[in-house]
Image (cartoon, coloured by chain):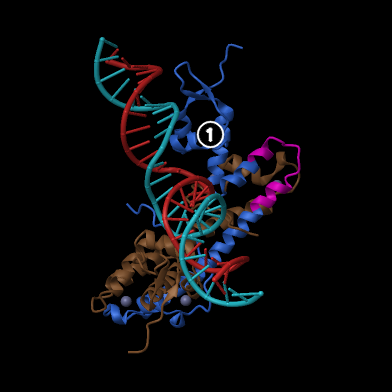
Chain colours: A blue, B brown, C red, D cyan
Amino acid sequence: MTHTAPHYPIGDLAKRTGTKVQTIRYYESIGLLPEPARTSGNQRIYGQDQLDRLAFIKHARDFGFPLDAIRELLEMTDRPAASCAEADAICRRHLTEVRRRIGRLQALEGELKRMVETCSHGTVADCRVISVLSDHEKCCAEEHEPVETMPYKATA
Amino acid sequence: MTHTAPHYPIGDLAKRTGTKVQTIRYYESIGLLPEPARTSGNQRIYGQDQLDRLAFIKHARDFGFPLDAIRELLEMTDRPAASCAEADAICRRHLTEVRRRIGRLQALEGELKRMVETCSHGTVADCRVISVLSDHEKCCAEEHEPVETMPYKATA
DNA sequence: TCTTGAACCTACAGTCGCTGTAGCTCCCAT
DNA sequence: ATGGGAGCTACAGCGACTGTAGGTTCAAGA
Ligand SMILES: [Zn+2]
Ligand SMILES: [Zn+2]
Ligand SMILES: [Zn+2]
Ligand SMILES: [Zn+2]
């Protein structure tokens, strides 16, 4: 056994998985990643297991899974002989949620499109956008379903 | 002038607009609603103006506009003779954002659908969901664009 | 008039998944 | 030995609320 297992500092882990260093520490703080070994100088060192685990988390986040769901999925990977029914259920639930959102957003798209297109682009007093927002009666939808909030992220 | 202008306590405002009492107080705290008059017992009382303003905010929120955009839109309603170009721009920007999200979510939908459908529903070790999440090579997308986070809201 | 209970008040913590900052310490190459 | 990049902890902030604790006010019924 002259071969040593690979070990990475936190920055390497970040680079290899495409997460940020702070995010890795955050995942540790909420118990999603186990506490790693430390050097004598108190710096984190990770092995292959942790790298794989973080890559899994990152990939699942890319799919939009919330951390709670990822936590459950990770627990399942520790029991490889168990049925995958629950994993599939989590995935289906997520798919359902994604579809629900698509539906809401498409309804929204239609309403916004109509507002912009109907406006004659004169003064605020005659603005279709403003008047529709002021009065639900002028609105094409009977009812509004709740839509998730939309901070416009760094369009830099 | 024997007729008094209508005045509502906060709960009435909430009921009439479909917002929550706390939300109204929150809007006041961030300066979206002006501070209302108070009774001798320090309770808020609102007039028609405030009701209209809150209804506008609520309706714009139903359309998914972020509060910053709503703030700008409200400022415009105070200058009815000005051009509505900026209002329309805000609306178009929002529409663009909505479409961007729809695109992301549709890509996601396809990937999730494939994962669920390809799984043979055996053990975790053979689970397609788990294996795709473990390995981007098994993934249908070359790259993942960032998707907004999705807490599954009260499915009670 | 008194009493009850709903509605109101303030202040603050929690949600979700990070991101950014301040003010340190550590490690490695020159 | 020194400089600078990487690491460390701890905490505040984002957006848009929601929930709680612990109190006060108000209006209707007995
Ligand atoms: Zn217009
Ligand atoms: Zn409407
Ligand atoms: Zn499966
Ligand atoms: Zn992938």
Q: Residue at x 44, y 36 (%)?
A: A22
When the figure is inspected, residue B123 is found, relative to residue B9, above or below; the finding is above
When the figure is inspected, residue A48 is found, relative to residue A144, above or below; the finding is above
Q: Chain of mark 1?
A: A
Residue A36: x %, y % from top left: 54, 26
Q: Residue at x 48, y 31 (%)?
A: A13
Residue A77: x %, y % from top left: 67, 37
Along the line of sight, the residue nearer the viewer: B100 or B94? B94
Residue A133: x %, y % from top left: 40, 75
Task: Please check the rendered image and state whether residue A87 is part of the magenta-colored stretch, yes or no.
Answer: yes
Q: Determine whether the residue tagged by mark 1 lies in a helix, strand or loop.
A: helix
Magenta stretch prevailing secondary structure: helix
* Range covered by the magenta-colored residues: A74-91
- Residue type pointed to by label 1: Glu
> Which residue bears the numbered disc 1?
A28
When the figure is inspected, residue A16 is found, relative to residue A105, above or below; the finding is above
B139 left or right, relative to B55: right
Task: Please check the rendered image and state whether residue A5 is part of the magenta-colored stretch, yes or no.
Answer: no
